[in-house]
Amino acid sequence: MTQQPFSRPGAIDLSALKRPTPAQPPGGSSTSGEAGPQGGTGGVGGSAYAVLVDEQNFQGILEASMGAAVLLVFYSQSRMPQSVGLAEDMQTLSDEFEGRFLVGLVDVDAVPQIAQAMQIPSIPLVIAVIDGRPMPLFQDLAPLDQLREALTQVGQQLTGQGITGRHQPRSTVVASEDGEPVVDPRYAPAQDALGEGNIELAVSEYQKLVDANPADVEAAAGLAMAQLLLRTQGVDLNTARAAAAAAPDNLDAQIMVADLDMLGGHVEDAFHRLVGLVARTTGDDRTRVRDHLIGLFGAVGNDDPRVLRGRQNLASALF
């Protein structure tokens, strides 16, 4: 398999894309579950960490790369039927890596405009997108084990560059037969503790889940929010704001107001305050503020547009 060494890539030119228009979903299927690229309803699509790409969601998928890596898989039933198998394998691996990558499945028969915008030279092709910038990853067929090894290496290289974000699952809604949502039993003890007002117990329960599976993004988000509730418990907002206004460079005071803003739903105000503090600090102080801000990102969710903007602003403040 031909694999390119990973490095920070260049920007995507989207000028070839027209304005989004209603179109048949990729793979020649409709939302009602008609035949897909292999003539069946299964196969490509429907994974928690893989999504079929079309003109309408393409920009959002690129924006998702600001928080964690996106892998675009270009395939074609008409030009190379075997490439559909690659798309299916990449979808399978997306679940195995539990959000380390979001796999965008691009059927070039259904959305040729995207292939044109990306200047795709051949099929199949897998492109890595980081911070909205692409680079070719590999461009031929390979067994599942080789693909798994290649993605493991990519993940290691990303970690070495400080890129450790994960995507939230895209299909986690579970419903009972009557259509009512069902609470995942893993999270029930923590949620019950929150409902009873026992925040310390909720933190402990979420921490157990994260310790057991660090890749569980829902547990990590729950832990971050429970910790936020614990930190702000009993704090008077007006007093905290006055303290922060009197000491603009006091880390504790500024972080507390950011936490209170988060709790009050003023998410972007919280991010803006801490990004500004990152820009004004250095060394251990900067690291502390940055890590706290990243924790707040996790509480909101990596796919949230406010988090994507916050990560962009954080990157600007750091460099």
Image (cartoon, grey):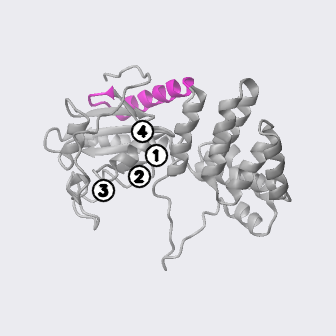
Q: Relative to 214, is 283 above or below?
A: above
The disc at residue 47 is 2
User: What amino acid type is highlighted by mark number 4?
Assistant: Val
The disc at residue 95 is 1
- Determine whether the residue tagged by mark 2 lies in a helix, strand or loop: loop
Q: Nearer the viewer, residue 252 or 224?
A: 252
Which region is colored magenta? 137-161
Looking at the image, residue 290 sits to the left or right of residue 256; the answer is left
How far apart marks 4 and 2 lie (CA) works out to 14 Å
The disc at residue 70 is 4
How far apart marks 1 and 4 lie (CA) works out to 13 Å
How far apart marks 3 and 1 lie (CA) works out to 16 Å
How far apart marks 1 and 2 lie (CA) works out to 7 Å
Q: Earlier in the sequence, mark 1 or mark 4?
A: 4
- Determine whether the residue tagged by mark 4 lies in a helix, strand or loop: strand
Q: Earlier in the sequence, mark 1 or mark 2?
A: 2
Q: Quadrant of residue 122?
A: top left
Q: Badge 4, how many Cα within 10 Å: few under 14, some, many 20+?
A: many
Q: Quadrant of residue 9?
A: top left
